[in-house]
Image (tube, helix red, strand yellow):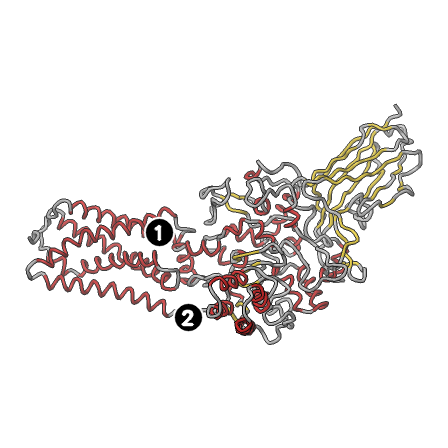
Amino acid sequence: MEPNTQAAGGGDVIIDYRSFLTWMATSVVIYLLLSGLAVLVLPFGTYVQYSIIVHSVVGLVATAPIGVAVCLHWKRRKASIVPPYDRIALAALVLLILGLSTGLFVAAQAMFGSEVGQLANLAHMLLGIALGVLIIVHLLPILARYRSAAPTARRPARKRFVATGAALVLTLFLATSWLASGVESTVPFQAFGDDYGWPYGEDHPFWPSRADLARPPWQENFLAGLAAELDAEGLEAFRAALDAPRSAGIRDTSRTLVEQLEIVPAVAERIDELAARAAREQRETGALRPEALTGSAGCGSGGCHEAIYAEWQASAHGYSAIDVVFVRVQKLLAESKGPAETRSCAGCHDPVALFSGARHAEAPMGEDMVTYEGNSCLVCHGIVETDTAGNGGFVLGVPGRYLYERAEGGLGEMLGKFLIRSYPDQHIAEYSRPLYRSSDFCAACHKQVPPPGEATVAGIAQEQNEYDSWRSSDWYHGEGDPKTIDCRECHMPLVASDDPARGSEWDSYRSADDGKHRSHRMLASNMYIPMTMDLPGGEEQARQTIAWMRGEIDVPEIEHKWVTGPVVKLDILAPDRIRPGELVNIKLQLHNNKTGHDFPAGPLDVLESWIELTVDDNLGNRLLELGTENSVAPSIDAPVVYKADWYDRQGLPVDRHNLWDVVGASYRRTIRSGDADIVDVPFRCPGIARPRLSQSASEEGPGERTSDVVFSIRNPELTELRVTARLLFRKANPEFIAKVYDLEPLAEAPVIELVSATHTIRVSAD
């Protein structure tokens, strides 16, 4: 039976089908539901992103007309709808209002906020699904009734209503497809320059760095060719070997696997041809465009990761490519061994230049590149796999970019931010991986190993290796053990934050709403470069670094498994009272209290840490000073110095950080994590006129410097001696700076006091 033709408010219901407002509102609601479903189920890409834009624009423009149309429809029909359809209709009306409201709220957050709330996003999605179900339930009985009813004057109007509505929905989808089809596909790869050096072969473009790219086109083409030659097990073996960080190119890796899998000669020959073709393709198209890895400033603008970007800018990761000391050492390396060898360092210090093929003969330092970002946001967060062999042992995935992501200013930048915020899942999947919480992630660069083929009879000395030092420390209890203190827990302590990246459920002591993010200052020991280069935020970086090195920055989240106090504890062990002329043995005890690896860590030929020891009497006289900060060479006469003196194949000193020449160490002293180092300094008190070093001064081993110290106590008013010891540190010793920079001016690295201790000795004949 036909429903009543008169609505409660008067006016024939047929007007609903003839009204432009009605069919437009209905069509738009259907489009919003279908396009929202498309965004939900289709894979991320250009079409989905334009669907988000068109969906949002249409929803924004049509909200008011839809509201008017639905309210008029409800007013006219509510009295004529019989149960239970009245409750279904009312529920649909409520869901529609809530869906439009949450949609507007989500769009406003995506456009003007820093992030879209998860609850708001989820609510909008669930409301849309529920509304779609109720609309179907609401319309199906009506459509069935109209289909079975005899023709009436209303049928043509209904057909026009359906036809025009379908046309509008189709038009909006076609417009989205047209917009998506107009986007030119950007290929992130480019050819290596004609002057690019290939000393390790055409399938080793980035060696001696072990850094490589994940699933590049030439590798995928190679695997596609292998599919016709190998069974599933053999193909998977090749895929796994090529996906992992490796020390061999495609051809060498392929030959090794062919031998291991015992592949028959005929197939092995075809596989070798495929590998050779892949190597040629890599040479012709294997360099990345720099813009594929740059744009860190965009990550820190528009209300996104502004705090994290500010921290990163002055960090060693941020300036690693433009560090004035690093740049100078790289030029020395290029002059000594050739530009290609600078790639050994570039994998960790300058990956953008390395992967873009900018480390070539004419520009060994990548001087022809406009942008220097060191370890940019996209480099670190683009790494998909690492190993613990060091020297840049990581595999970098080329990150997918959102539409307009690289736009600067105007509508383009606004749309880029809007898409990231409104569709954050792809962004999170690309840049937030469990890998980043593992200390193995850090091992890729914080472990130096000899370049391939560089072993000598004497052996190549390992200059620095924080990773294995940490693994052998008391802080490591096994992978995943809650007692283990990982790299990030110390060097990236949690800070209060409203950053979109705040919160995490990865750690047992964190939650998704803890209101904190891990500091990207990467606090360690380098306060020198941020100040010398006057980097943005350099002063604050230096201040926090010094506080960090002194152990003055607490890390509450790991206090249950860490220790308190200074990084290195310093105690003076000496008697409280001595007689005139008595031999006294002063012990200086240093305990590596907080460092999870050896102290000091880093380039031991560049930095140095030493003990300054002074003795003053109660009359104001300085009786002894060893290793004083203001002396010409404090580390020469210091009681102990922590550093390394390397030598080359000719036995000559390595004094320009030319690690490529190192074969051994004539002196190396550090303190293992959790261990103590004791330095003895004997004092003797005969009655002579002035203090001096006795003839028994000697070195009893590497860094074991002991001396008999003689001073006068003839004055009867001398009743007290004050012994003061300070542990000092500087990032770059003056001798190194003088060698590397010759006559070029460069500020001297500041001397930092890490910890001090005093002890008072009473002098009495009794």
Q: CA distance from mark 1 to mark 2?
A: 29 Å
Q: In the rendered structure, find residue 184 and report the number of the disc placed on it.
A: 2
Judging depth in this view, the residue of 637 and 162 nearest the camera is: 162
The percent position of residue 744, horizontal first and vertical second, equals: 73, 62
Is 383 left or right of 640, judged from the image as shown? Answer: left
Q: In the rendered structure, find residue 106 and report the number of the disc placed on it.
A: 1
Q: Can residue 293 be seen in the rendering of this structure?
A: no
**How crowded is the residue under tag 2: few (<14 C-alpha within 10 Å), some, or many (20+)?**
few
Q: Vertically, is 66 above or below 568?
A: below
Q: Nearer the viewer, mark 1 or mark 2?
A: 2
Judging depth in this view, the residue of 725 and 253 nearest the camera is: 253
Q: Vertically, is 588 above or below 654?
A: above
Secondary element under disc 1, as helix, strand or loop, is: helix
The percent position of residue 35, horizontal first and vertical second, equals: 30, 59
The percent position of residue 411, horizontal first and vertical second, equals: 40, 62
Judging depth in this view, the residue of 419 and 206 nearest the camera is: 206
The residue located at (89%, 29%) in the rendering is 580
Is 329 left or right of 230, judged from the image as shown? Answer: right
Secondary element under disc 2, as helix, strand or loop, is: loop
Is 274 left or right of 740, judged from the image as shown? Answer: left
The percent position of residue 691, horizontal first and vertical second, equals: 89, 39
Q: Can residue 332 be seen in the rendering of this structure?
A: yes
Residue 269, picture quadrant = bottom right
